[in-house]
Image (cartoon, rainbow, N blue to C red):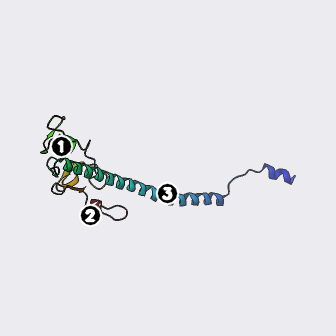
Amino acid sequence: MNFRITRNRRRAFSLIELVIVVVILGVIGAVAIPRMSRGAEGAAESALVSNLATLRGAIELYAAEHGGTFPTEANFADQMLLYSNASGGTNATKTGAFIYGPYLRSVPALPVGARQGSSGVAAADAAGIGWIYDDTTGSIVSNTTGAEVNGSGTAWNTF
């Protein structure tokens, strides 16, 4: 008779087993959440590096085709996005005189910092400007402050 009672007993998890499962899930969450947030930061950093490489390559190609002259800060977008002639004048369509370019399909947006999403280019910090460009040297950097840094403490504007 004792045998029959044991067989009909319900099987369930004990409180200790449930606590162990909750602790294991907590440990997994504590490890996984920081890794996911670092992944998003890594993606933004990769986008910044890629955008800068694209911009710098386009600037260098423009200079190579225009006798060493860099695009002007005032006409940067037009000179990168439209056809140009040897003197840097621009036109929306390719004609006999306007044989160079375009060098970019669009000016990429800044992927990091307080001005994230801005795609404008200027010589100095301004609202709506994502990139700081020096037309005397052809250098371009992100329009971020020295206080805006990646996970390892490197300022975004030093890339």
Percent x, y for residue 72? 15, 50
**Percent position of residue 6, x then y:** 81, 53
Say what secondary structure mark 1 lies in. helix
- Tell me the SS state at disc 2: loop
**Quarter of the image holding residue 86?**
top left
Towards the viewer: 127 or 8: 127
Q: Which residue is mark 2?
A: 146
Name the element at disc 3: helix
Q: Can residue 120 be seen in the rendering of this structure?
A: yes
Front residue of 149 and 68: 68
Three-letter code for the amino acid on which mark 3 is drawn: Ala
Q: In what quadrant of the picture does the C terminus appear?
A: bottom left
In this rendering, position of residue 31 left or right of residue 122? right
Q: Is residue 128 at all visible to an observer of this figure?
A: no
Q: Earlier in the sequence, mark 3 or mark 2?
A: 3
- Outermost residue on the bottom side: it is 153
Classify 10 Å Cα crowding around label 3: few (below 14), some (14-19), many (20 and above). Answer: few
Question: Which residue, as the protein is rendered here, is positioned at the far right?
Answer: 1
- Foreground: disc 1 or disc 3: 1
**How much space separates mark 1 and mark 3, taking CA atoms?**
45 Å
* Amino acid residing under circle 1: Asp
- State the image coordinates of residue 142 (x, y, percent, origin top left): 26, 56
Marks 2/1: CA–CA distance: 29 Å
Asked if the residues shown at circle 1 and circle 3 are in contact, with their CB atoms under 8 angstroms apart, the answer is: no
Q: Which residue is mark 3?
A: 32
Mark 2 is on which residue type?
A: Gly
Q: Is residue 154 left or right of residue 139?
A: right
**Mark nearer the N terminus (1 vs 3):** 3
What residue is disc 1 on? 78
Q: Badge 2 local density, few (<14 within 10 Å), some, or many (20+)?
A: few
